Amino acid sequence: MNIGVPKDKKLILFDGVCNLCNSSVLYVIKRDKKNQFMFAPLQSEVGKNIIEKFNIDTNEVDSIILYNPEKDKINYKSRAALKVASQLGFPVNMLSIFLIIPSFISNWVYDFIARNRYKWYGKKDACMIPTPELKSKFLE
């Protein structure tokens, strides 16, 4: 299955209707000085293809997946967020220190935020539509 992500990029799949997720995507874009990330909503065809390929239970993982096409590997939840942060430069990259914490602990915190994200930050009726300037960073 060809996902369509260049080997030198990493794809961040995000909940396209979540306001927190959309704000996080814009935050990453602004700080991605090495232009290494691309984006797609989980609800997109690309998102569905990765979910299917890796047999992801969307009841368990519904907010962020980081796909590395070079290794054909995914990270999700706290690991994905921390691996993205590790690539964004100082001081955000300092969050990568939390990668030493076992996933079951860091995912507990992540899941608490994810469960409450719509209540705290709201939700859109449809996925974010990137501006023409940002369109090249998004896969459909």
Image: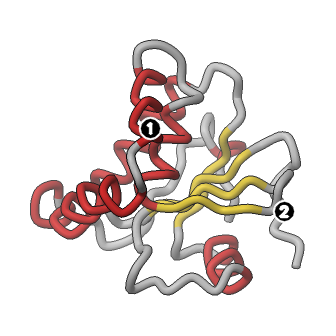
Q: Is residue 127 left or right of residue 123?
A: right
Instruction: Assign the C terminus to one quadrant of the image.
Output: bottom right
User: Alpha-carbon neighbours of circle 1 within 10 Å: few (<14), some, or many (≥20)?
Assistant: few
Relative to 54, is 16 on the left or the right? left
Question: Which three-letter amino acid code belongs to the residue tagged 2?
Answer: Gly
Residue beneath disc 1: 26
Q: Secondary structure at mark 1?
A: helix
User: Marks 1 and 2, Cα distance to the nearest angstrom?
Assistant: 22 Å
Q: Residue at x 67, y 86 (%)?
A: 52
Residue for point 54% across, 39% down: 84
**Above or below for 115 versus 113:** below
The answer to which of 67 and 126 lies nearer the viewer is: 67
The quadrant in which the N terminus is found is bottom right
Q: Nearer the viewer, residue 3 or 57?
A: 57
Task: List the single residue furthest toward the top.
Answer: 90
Q: Which residue occupies 45% across, 40% down?
A: 100
Q: Which residue is mark 2?
A: 4
Q: Is residue 71 above or below residue 42?
A: above
Residue 96 point in image, percent of width and height:
47, 32
On the image, the x and y values in percent for residue 6 come to 86, 49
Q: Going by the image, does 14 lie left or right of 53?
A: left
- x then y, percent, for residue 21: 36, 53
- Of labels 1 and 2, earlier in sequence is 2
